[in-house]
Image (spheres, grey):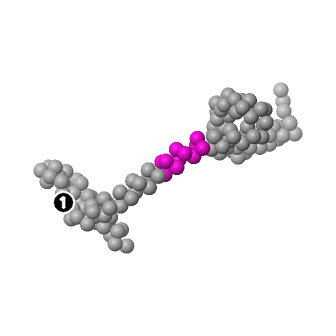
Amino acid sequence: LKLTNQQIVPWIALMIVSVLAFVVMLPFLVPIAWAGILSYTSWPIAERIRAWCNNRDTLAAAIASTLVAITLLLPLIWIAWLAQKEVTQLYPAVKDFLETPYQTPSLFIQQPWLNDLFGDWLAQLVATASNAEEA
């Protein structure tokens, strides 16, 4: 089978366009997969809601969408609240740590090779953190 340039060029162009289309679609593949999983798993609930709404599709879709949004947003709000609570406790702890003078742990003092290896690094780390707080 002998192919001419007129036969090869369209196939090469088609392959290039296909690869470029795949590259464009690549960021959307995971969200599309999750949308498929979510729609498949929530279908029985949507059917029950539709039956409860006397087959009014718009009302059933609105209720189902609201339930999905609440299901996804409530844990995120809870996590944000917990993170905010932890950060308010973290700031005083870091401030106290930086205000107290640095003391080498006894393990480092007892083992000279550990002190040589990590002592200067720890002192520099605390000094850098203290300088960052002052700025």
Q: Amino acid at mark 1?
A: Gln
At which x and y percent is residue 131? 32, 69
Would you say residue 101 sits in the magenta stretch? no
SS label for mark 1 = loop
Up-down: is 38 above or below 130?
above
Residue 87 lies in quadrant: bottom left
At which x and y percent is residue 19? 72, 41
Please indicate whether residue 125 sits to the left or right of residue 57 in the image.
Answer: left
Would you say residue 77 sits in the magenta stretch? yes
At which x and y percent is residue 32? 67, 39
**Residue at position x 70%, y 46% from top?**
24
* Residues in magenta, as a range: 70-80
Up-down: is 12 above or below 132?
above
Most common SS among magenta residues: helix
Residue 43 seen:
no
Please indicate whether residue 8 sits to the left or right of residue 29 in the image.
Answer: right
- Mark 1 is surrounded, within 10 Å at the Cα level, by few (under 14), some (14 to 19) or many (20 or more) other residues, namely few
The residue sitting at the top extreme is 1
**Residue at position x 18%, y 54% from top?**
105
In terms of depth relative to the viewer, which is nearer, 125 or 58?
A: 58
Up-down: is 102 above or below 49?
below
The residue sitting at the right extreme is 6
Please indicate whether residue 71 sits to the left or right of residue 45 in the image.
Answer: left
Up-down: is 65 above or below 93?
above
Q: Quadrant of the C terminus?
A: bottom left
| Residue identifier under label 1 | 103
**Residue at position x 49%, y 47% from top?**
78
Residue 74 seen:
yes
